[in-house]
């Protein structure tokens, strides 16, 4: 019986390999509200989305006709069912505009406004969740109570269709002043790669700056810590946010700011890919 099972597994292997498209590039996106998407989606953001830019839906969204884990053209919202514009929107659009026509891009988005990086700590997240405010718990529960596990689950499903090329992070506002933030990010990164069966340090992580001080950024001091991330995580790249238009709260970016920031993420990724 065991030998028969092994033979059947080997017979299935070519089918599984054939199902994985090397030209479907997958990007994992996580963080807090500036990754989740805070700005109102405008008409220009809903039109002209190239079908080569796709979204792996993180949850069932009946009003949008989406089912969890399925691929759709990446018309916003890309986060939860009712979130706003995010840097990932124009990251993906810019990539497909500049990559060969046979390459598709898919994003997997798990982000929760207001959360600390500790929410994505697979070993210690429960202690953070235990103190999370009620409004945040609704979002956490939307990801099955464990956003990290949901991100891995969605990524594994996506890996059956394509290959992981990068990780996008925008988080830090809630960890302002935390000198241990780079080490905590590295911990999440290392766990992600291990859980997805990827070689250590093999995937670039792109981390965006928060709103700058010259724009009245409430958490601007965190940028000094974010810029040190490559010292702890060698395959990390910091995406500057200087000059990106901001919202009135001086904490989030405006729609125009998200578009510009997303294009900067894309420019860095294209450089890494050799374009």
Image (spheres, rainbow, N blue to C red):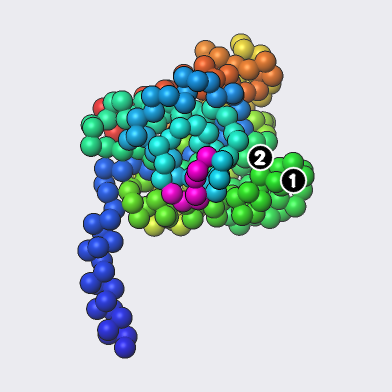
Q: In this view, does 70 lie above or below 88?
A: below
What x and y, as percent, mark residue 162? 32, 48
Image check: 22 left or right of 121?
left
Mark 1 Cα within 10 Å, few/some/many (few <14, many 20+)?
Answer: some
What label sits on residue 132 in the rendered view?
1
Kindly give the residue lying farthest to the bottom in the view shown: 1
Q: Residues within 10 Å of mark 2 (few under 14, many from 20)?
A: many
- Work out whether residue 129 or residue 172 is closer to the camera in this orientation and state it: 129
Tell me what residue is drawn at x 55 percent, y 14 percent.
245
Residue 103 in view: yes
| Rendered image: mark on residue 115 | 2
Q: In this view, does 91 lie to the left or right of 161?
A: right
Return the disc, 2 or 1, that comes first in the chain's sequence: 2
Look at the magenta stretch and give its main secondary structure: loop
Q: Residue 17 carries which label?
A: none
- Magenta segment range? 64-70
Residue located at (32% from left, 35% from top): 52
- Image position of 43 (left or right of 201): right
Quarter of the picture containing the N terminus is bottom left
Q: What element carries label 2?
A: loop
Q: Which of 17 and 191 is in front in this view?
A: 17
At a point 64% along the width and 30% down the height, the residue shown is 173
């Amino acid at each position: 019986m065991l030998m028969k099972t092994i033979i059947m597994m080997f017979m299935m292997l070519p089918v599984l390999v054939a199902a994985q498209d090397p030209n479907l590039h997958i990007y994992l996106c996580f963080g807090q509200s500036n990754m989740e998407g805070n700005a109102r989606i405008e008409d220009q953001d809903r039109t002209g989305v190239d079908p080569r830019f796709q979204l792996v839906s993180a949850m069932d969204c009946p009003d949008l006709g989406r089912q969890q884990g399925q691929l759709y053209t990446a018309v916003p919202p890309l986060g939860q069912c009712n979130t706003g514009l995010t840097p990932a929107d124009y990251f993906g659009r810019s990539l497909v505009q500049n990559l060969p026509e046979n390459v598709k891009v898919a994003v997997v988005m798990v982000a929760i406004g207001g959360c600390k990086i500790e929410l994505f700590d697979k070993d210690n997240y429960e202690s953070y969740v235990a103190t999370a405010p009620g409004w945040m718990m609704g979002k956490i529960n939307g990801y099955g109570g464990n956003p990290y596990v949901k991100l891995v689950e969605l990524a594994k499903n996506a890996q059956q269709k394509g290959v992981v090329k990068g990780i996008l992070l925008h988080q830090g506002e809630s960890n302002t002043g935390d000198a241990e933030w780079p080490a905590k990010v590295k911990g999440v990164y290392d766990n992600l790669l291990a859980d997805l069966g990827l070689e250590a340090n093999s995937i670039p992580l792109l981390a965006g700056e928060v709103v700058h001080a010259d724009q009245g950024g409430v958490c601007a001091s965190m940028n000094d810590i974010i810029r040190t991330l490559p010292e702890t995580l060698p395959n990390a790249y910091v995406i500057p946010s200087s000059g990106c238009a901001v919202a009135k709260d001086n904490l989030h970016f405006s729609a125009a700011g998200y578009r510009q920031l997303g294009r900067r993420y894309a420019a860095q990724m294209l450089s890494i890919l050799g374009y």
